[in-house]
Amino acid sequence: MAIKVEVPASTSNLGAGFDTFGLALTLYNTFEVEENNQFEVEIIGEGADKLSKGDDNLFLKVYKRTCQELGIPCKPIRVVQKNNVPLGRGLGSSATAILGGIITATALGGINLTTDEVLKIAFNFESHPDNLVPALVGGFVTCAVDRDKVYFERIEFPKELQILVLIPEFEILTEEARKVLPKEVSLKDAVFNIQRATLLISALVNRDFDLLRVAVEDRLHQPFRGKLLKGFDTFKELAYSFGADAVFISGSGSTIGVFTRKNADQIGEEGVRLYREMGISAKYLVLEADEKGARWSRV
């Protein structure tokens, strides 16, 4: 049996929604899998020279763990991992491998899992739902975790908004990005974020896009992670000067996300120019929201 698994990238936090908001994007990692007489991994694209092709490959680890937890035969497989999602850039690359491994195990094992069951296995490898959930179900999601169970609601992302991602060529590891965050925050800052997080949801549902600039302001993580992300504040003001509706750090960075109704390519080109002047390579992509989430098919 041979299958193809496709999992979208995701952007998370979106300003004030720290560890809460996530959005699936039309940028994909694909895993072409066939049963084999031994385990083999081939990696094409992003991370081809960095990611393990052995037993500690994340996709393989998740595949084997899923088979073990479900009590199904762990069939040896050959996987061709085609990566379009950059590593360590805040676009959910690890979530794609985790979900890819789970979906492969269930597809080859002939088992159907609920969304909750998939997420329970996925949480063994990543405890933050804001990348996992949108990559699994698609669209814009808001998540909450209680006693290791994920609760989430999904809304359709407005088609009027283009999603620009500016991707500088340097990594910011999630672990390092979390170390710079304060252990405690003031009541004033907590209220500030609650106000803006709820405003973002209302603005998206009601298509009141003029509110987005205020709605993605944040005091819990972006002021601190912005110090690791060279050029963020400068690019933010530049993007707004060209008509962007919202600018935010994608996940823990280094990608910067932009929602805009106009001048997407111009904003991206200006961002690339800005980083080039700082001696840093960068690229940009203009994407849409993926509304389907992870899927597989026979090949």
Image (cartoon, rainbow, N blue to C red):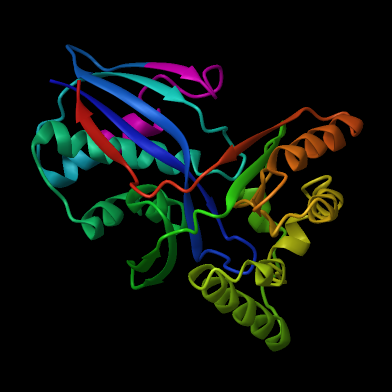
Tell whether 239 sits left or right of 90. right
> In the rendered image of this protein, does residue 290 appear above or below residue 265?
below
Is residue 25 in the magenta section? no
283 and 70: which is toward the camera:
283
> In the rendered image of this protein, does residue 159 appear above or below residue 155?
above
Q: Quadrant of residue 28?
A: top left
Percent of width and height locating residue 163: 59, 47
Which quadrant is the N terminus positioned in? top left
User: Residue farthest to the top?
Assistant: 37
Tell whether 237 sits left or right of 176. right
170 and 247: which is toward the camera:
247
Residue 69 in view (yes/no): yes
Is residue 45 in the magenta section? yes
Residue positioned 73% across, 38% down in the render:
268
Q: Quadrant of residue 207?
A: bottom right
Tell whether 217 sits left or right of 34. right
Q: How many marks?
A: 0
Tell whether 137 sits left or right of 93. left
Q: Quadrant of residue 296?
A: top left
Percent of width and height locating residue 279: 88, 28
Percent of width and height locating residue 217: 71, 69
Q: Which residues are magenta?
A: 42-64
110 and 125: which is toward the camera:
110
Residue 173 in view (yes/no): no
Percent of width and height locating residue 116: 24, 60
User: Residue farthest to the right?
Assistant: 277
Residue positioned 79% across, 33% down in the render:
272
155 and 226: which is toward the camera:
155
> In the rendered image of this protein, does residue 173 appear above or below residue 82?
below
Which quadrant is the C terminus positioned in? top left
